[in-house]
Image (cartoon, grey):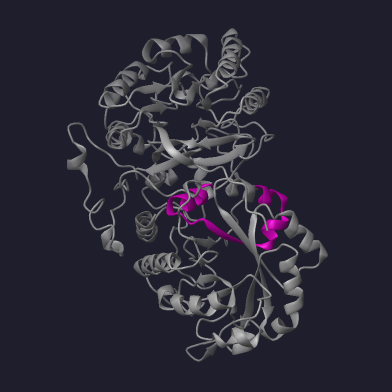
């Protein structure tokens, strides 16, 4: 089975730059120029981000627009622009800015909530901030910045920018092209209908064609205050989060309500941040730096504003070892990203729907006439920042064309997928698996224990045909009468039991014989420490020529009760990392949940909460994984 196509990042780091967006500076610190109380924090959040960016010492900084909150027709615009320059003055790296809708007006639509961009607004902007588009060379890169608000306006200014852009890209084809604009081109598909947060045709298609023709490495945008990622041909499409606040409409993407006091999702602090981009001899990596809404008031330095625990104690495991909400998680240069390689062979079951867009309700604020599609890409961000690079999905994901395409997008970023099915594949299923060989690393076949020996020949045939086959026995309460406190409970498990190694011999996987599968799946007892069993499992599988996949069950034995604590989940996940470090080549450890399960069966703590925000467990896990790579 072939390995996924990857866009690796390798070699020497040739450039490093920061990207910030949607600061929404107000004219006066601590005073909100909008109905949202959280906007009073915007200026203080900018001050903290400047200090954090300075810590990372990038070569330069790009601001993707919405520098200020008041629009050009409002009286607070000039004072806000002046305040923005004052707040950014301590920035030690060169700053390059491009306009957003708050800076020069909305894109050309009849029903936009604010006045659309005009030549007068652009002239006003240029007097305060400089040119509305431009480009420069830095090392191997050509940085190209466009005014996205005038696209589709039909103006002379738009025509001049298109002519400039094409000439600019053509003249620098020998450089690696990084292109920036405030407005996203699209969120989920190149042919999606226009809404407030994308670029309409024909401008969208024209820009995508130019990016493809000249092989642009990335397009980075902002505007929606929410993280999204996709690929279009050779180009990575990034939509980066905001410094100031979350857009409330995108709170619809998450499975839990915002906590009381978060302004119905706007002050979802854990999703705020900026990006650090590293450009290597081959490829690039975008690290999202979560600021957790950190603030600094005027006159306060970063050392004084540091919350207890943001550096000290992070190697410990437990709630008490971590910052309170709002504390920074910056620990120096980020090191975890599947594109960088070197990660431990550890991953997670993707139990929840993860690949398909949801529809965000129309609100009467920014979109009033229809729902817009969007995807919860904070799940992708969670996988990146923890280094969980092995992803297990059900066969239905492979069978669905849209989900399979999303798998290929993940694979291009260094993630490895496996799938599972009950019973041997029929001809149609085999064709499906063979057709997805570029994105699948292995296929797990689940069979009742009594059937395994009789299916050895057919499993061997699948292996010879090119599928990398793992074997997993079915274990349900119908077979072993699972009970909780003496009461029967319905349970379906799969995988060899660590305490029943003799079953390998019983099914015909004996030492010294050529195995009829490539590997086997073992599954821990719920809550069992993986390091307590890993050496025995390696000792049983390696002499038989078998790779080992170990599923780590998080939670207790009772499907009707929440067992343990957040600290227990952190300890178990970190222990799984230690077990993964011991595996020989071809092995993996799979955690059974990424997010908390607070409804349904086997409620338990995961690494992230239901709003896809980091927890003590994910912070501990990321810190341990960073230390191992």
Q: Quadrant of residue 432?
A: bottom right
Q: Is residue 381 left or right of residue 410?
A: left
- Pick the residue in front: 220 or 444: 444
* Relative vertical location of residue 414 with respect to residue 480 in this rendering, above or below: above
> Was residue 399 drawn as part of the magenta stretch in this picture?
yes
Magenta span: predominant SS is helix
> Was residue 327 drawn as part of the magenta stretch in this picture?
no
Q: How many numbered circles are shown?
A: 0
Q: Which x, y percent locates residue 227?
A: 49, 41
Write down the region rendered in magenta.
377-405
* Residue at screen point 53% across, 41% down: 228
Q: Quadrant of the C terminus?
A: bottom left
Q: Which x, y percent locates residue 316?
A: 28, 63
Q: Which x, y percent locates residue 408?
A: 64, 48
Q: Quadrant of residue 614?
A: bottom left
- Pick the residue in front: 208 or 440: 440
Q: Which x, y percent locates residue 50?
A: 30, 32
Residue 424 visible in this rendered orientation of the protein: no
Q: Is residue 317 left or right of residue 413?
A: left
* Residue at screen point 77% across, 63% down: 429
* Residue at screen point 82% across, 65% down: 427
Residue lying furthest right: 427
Residue lying furthest bottom: 486
* Relative vertical location of residue 615 with respect to residue 454 in this rendering, above or below: above
- Pick the residue in front: 426 or 345: 345
Residue 556 visible in this rendered orientation of the protein: yes
Q: Quadrant of the N terminus?
A: bottom right
Q: Is residue 543 left or right of residue 456?
A: left
Q: Is residue 545 left or right of residue 563?
A: right
Residue lying furthest front: 512
* Residue at screen point 29% across, 22% down: 83
């Amino acid at each position: 089975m072939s390995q996924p196509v990857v866009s690796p990042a390798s070699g020497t780091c040739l450039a490093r730059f920061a990207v910030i967006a949607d600061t929404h500076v107000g004219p006066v610190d601590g005073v909100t120029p909008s109905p949202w109380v959280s906007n009073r924090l915007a200026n203080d959040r900018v001050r903290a981000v400047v200090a954090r960016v300075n810590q990372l010492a990038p070569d330069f900084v790009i601001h993707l627009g919405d520098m200020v909150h008041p629009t050009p027709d409002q009286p607070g615009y000039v004072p806000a622009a002046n305040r923005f320059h004052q707040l950014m003055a301590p920035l030690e790296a060169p700053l390059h800015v491009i306009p957003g809708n708050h800076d020069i007006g909305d894109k050309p639509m009849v029903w936009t909530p604010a006045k659309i961009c005009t030549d007068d607004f652009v002239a006003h902007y240029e007097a305060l901030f400089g040119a509305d588009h431009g480009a420069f060379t830095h090392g191997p890169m050509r940085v190209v910045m466009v005014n996205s608000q005038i696209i589709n306006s039909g103006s002379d200014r738009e025509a001049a920018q298109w002519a400039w852009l094409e000439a600019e890209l053509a003249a620098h084809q020998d450089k690696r092209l990084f292109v920036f604009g405030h407005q996203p081109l699209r969120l989920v598909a190149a042919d999606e209908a226009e809404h407030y947060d994308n670029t309409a045709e024909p401008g969208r298609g024209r820009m995508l064609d130019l990016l493809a023709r000249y092989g642009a490495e990335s397009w980075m945008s902002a505007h929606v205050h929410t993280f999204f990622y996709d690929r279009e041909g050779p180009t990575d499409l990034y939509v980066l989060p905001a410094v100031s606040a979350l857009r409330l409409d995108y709170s619809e993407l998450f499975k839990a309500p915002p906590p009381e006091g978060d302004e119905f999702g706007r002050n979802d602090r854990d999703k705020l941040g900026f990006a650090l981009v590293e450009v290597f001899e081959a490829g690039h990596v975008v690290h999202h730096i979560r600021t957790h809404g950190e603030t600094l008031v005027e006159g306060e330095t970063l050392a004084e504003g540091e919350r207890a625990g943001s550096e000290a104690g992070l190697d410990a495991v437990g709630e008490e070892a971590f910052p309170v909400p709002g504390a920074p998680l910056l620990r120096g240069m980020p090191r975890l990203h599947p594109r960088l390689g070197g990660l431990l062979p550890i991953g997670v079951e993707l139990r929840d729907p993860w690949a398909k867009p949801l529809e965000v309700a129309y609100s009467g604020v920014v979109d009033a006439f229809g729902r817009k599609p969007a995807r919860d890409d904070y799940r992708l961000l969670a996988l990146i920042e923890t280094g969980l690079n092995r992803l297990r999905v059900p066969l239905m994901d492979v069978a669905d064309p849209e989900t399979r395409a999303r798998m290929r997008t993940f694979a291009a970023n260094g993630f490895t997928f496996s799938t599972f099915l009950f019973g041997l594949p029929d001809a149609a299923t085999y064709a499906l698996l063979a057709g997805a060989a570029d994105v699948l690393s292995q296929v797990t076949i689940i069979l009742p224990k009594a059937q395994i020996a009789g299916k050895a020949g057919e499993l061997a045939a699948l292996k010879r045909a090119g599928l990398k086959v793992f074997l997993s026995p079915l274990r349900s309460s119908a077979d072993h009468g699972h009970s909780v406190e003496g009461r029967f409970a319905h349970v379906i498990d799969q995988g060899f039991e660590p305490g029943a190694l003799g079953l390998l011999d019983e099914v015909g996987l004996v030492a010294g014989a050529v195995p009829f599968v490539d590997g086997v799946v073992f599954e821990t007892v719920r809550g069992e420490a993986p390091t307590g069993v890993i050496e025995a499992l390696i000792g049983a599988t390696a002499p038989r020529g078998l790779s080992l996949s170990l599923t780590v069950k998080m939670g207790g034995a009772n499907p009707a009760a929440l067992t343990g604590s957040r600290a227990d989940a952190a300890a178990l996940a970190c222990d799984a990392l230690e077990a993964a470090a011991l595996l020989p080549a071809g092995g993996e450890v799979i955690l059974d949940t990424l997010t908390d399960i607070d409804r349904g069966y086997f409620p338990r703590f995961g690494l992230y909460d239901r709003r896809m925000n980091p927890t003590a467990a994910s912070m501990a896990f990321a810190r341990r994984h960073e230390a191992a790579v």
